[in-house]
Amino acid sequence: MNARWFRDNLSVVIFSVIFVGFLGGIIWFLRTAYAEQATVLQELEAQQGELHRFQDGKPYPSDENISVLKRDHTQIKRLYGLMQNAAIRDVIHPPDLERDMDFAQLMRSTVGRLTDTATSNNVKIDPTFAWGFSRYIATIPCKNPAAKGDDCKRLLRLLAKQLLIVEKLSGALITSKVESIGAIRRTEVEPGSSGDTLSAPITDDAKSLYRTYPFELAFTADTDALRSLLNSLAQADNLYIVRSVKITVVTQQVRAPSAPVSPPTPDSVDIEVKMPDVPKTIERRLLNVTVRVDVVEFKPIETKPVKH
């Protein structure tokens, strides 16, 4: 070969070089594709082996799996029943009120009874204290907005239930010998609010197993009275859950009790010594307490009839 041959066959040489390069690229692409195909085939073979393993095994649901499921369900139901029986307390049943005036009369009698009880037990309250129902001192329910028929009856029943709960909680406060009661707050069951409004809703749990009625008690007491109240809530017939207790310590000056005077003995000489009358005072430690408490009522366990 010489330069003249390359010059005469330059186009053939260039085409041959391009063809060889293109052929090399095709070969490299095919080798890469074959390698990827082998990897895919290996993964497919592994998945097919897993599929054959599932197909050759005992298919679900087997009798064994069904037996395990039934046994677990029975155990869970039994444990839930034990837990519910341990937590379940008496349910507060309010009276069936037909008219709004029936609730007004019930509320007035309850408020009057609680006020008399507090006064006779030296528990201080404001003269206008309405025990959480100040909204209904001048108004009656089912009026704003208007509610009639069954809607009004449901509202009256809920208000009556709250009234009975307040009576029980107030009785616990008075029995525990608190110093004073400042406020009782409850969830409003009608639109609107008052000074007794508690911004916590009456709620049902996700599975409707129980219902929670929130309340808040603000009072002044000493340590013994607070301890007595918490113990009475824990031992009550109803289920009270104390959510929070906020305490502020205050002191007040009170007159010290006079020391008893010993009677004179036969040999004693009466000597009258006049001392200046200086009243003695001592500091008394009190607690301003706010207790958030929920009344929880579990729904009874439904027993389904056994199919024969």
Image (tube, rainbow, N blue to C red):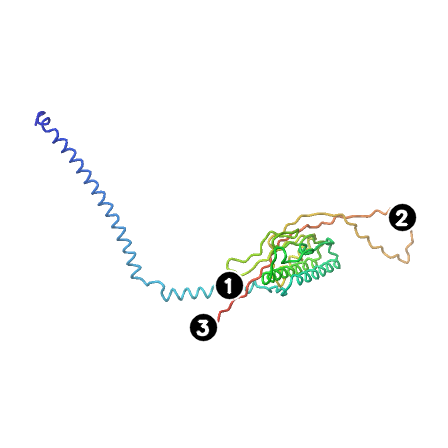
Q: Which sits earlier in the primary sequence, circle 1 or circle 2?
A: 1
Of badges 1 and 3, nearer the viewer stands: 3
Q: Which residue corresponds to mark 2?
A: 274
Q: Is 3 left or right of 46, judged from the image as shown?
A: left
Q: Is residue 306 above or below residue 108?
A: below
Q: Are marks 2 and 3 in contact (CB under 8 Å)?
A: no
Count residues near mark 1 (Cα–Cα under 10 Å), then give few for <14, some for 14-19, many for 20+: few
Q: Are marks 1 and 3 in contact (CB under 8 Å)?
A: no
Q: Are marks 1 and 2 in contact (CB under 8 Å)?
A: no
Which quadrant of the rendered structure holds the N terminus? top left
Of badges 2 and 3, nearer the viewer stands: 3
The numbered disc on residue 32 is: none
Residue 130 at x, y percent in the picture: 69, 56
Count residues near mark 3 (Cα–Cα under 10 Å), then give few for <14, some for 14-19, many for 20+: few
Q: Which sits earlier in the primary sequence, circle 1 or circle 3?
A: 1
Mark pair 1, 3: CA separation = 23 Å
Q: Which residue corresponds to mark 1?
A: 80
Mark pair 1, 2: CA separation = 76 Å
Q: Is residue 110 above or below residue 35?
A: below
Q: Is 286 left or right of 62, judged from the image as shown?
A: right
From the viewer's side, name the closer residue of 143 and 282: 143
Instruction: State the residue at coordinates (83%, 55%).
Output: 260
Q: Which residue corresponds to mark 3?
A: 307
Q: Is 301 left or right of 17, judged from the image as shown?
A: right
Count residues near mark 2 (Cα–Cα under 10 Å), then give few for <14, some for 14-19, many for 20+: few
From the viewer's side, name the closer residue of 302 and 162: 162
* SS label for mark 3: loop
Instruction: State the residue at coordinates (65%, 49%).
Output: 247
Residue 65 at x, y percent in the picture: 38, 64
Instruction: State the residue at coordinates (48%, 71%).
Output: 305
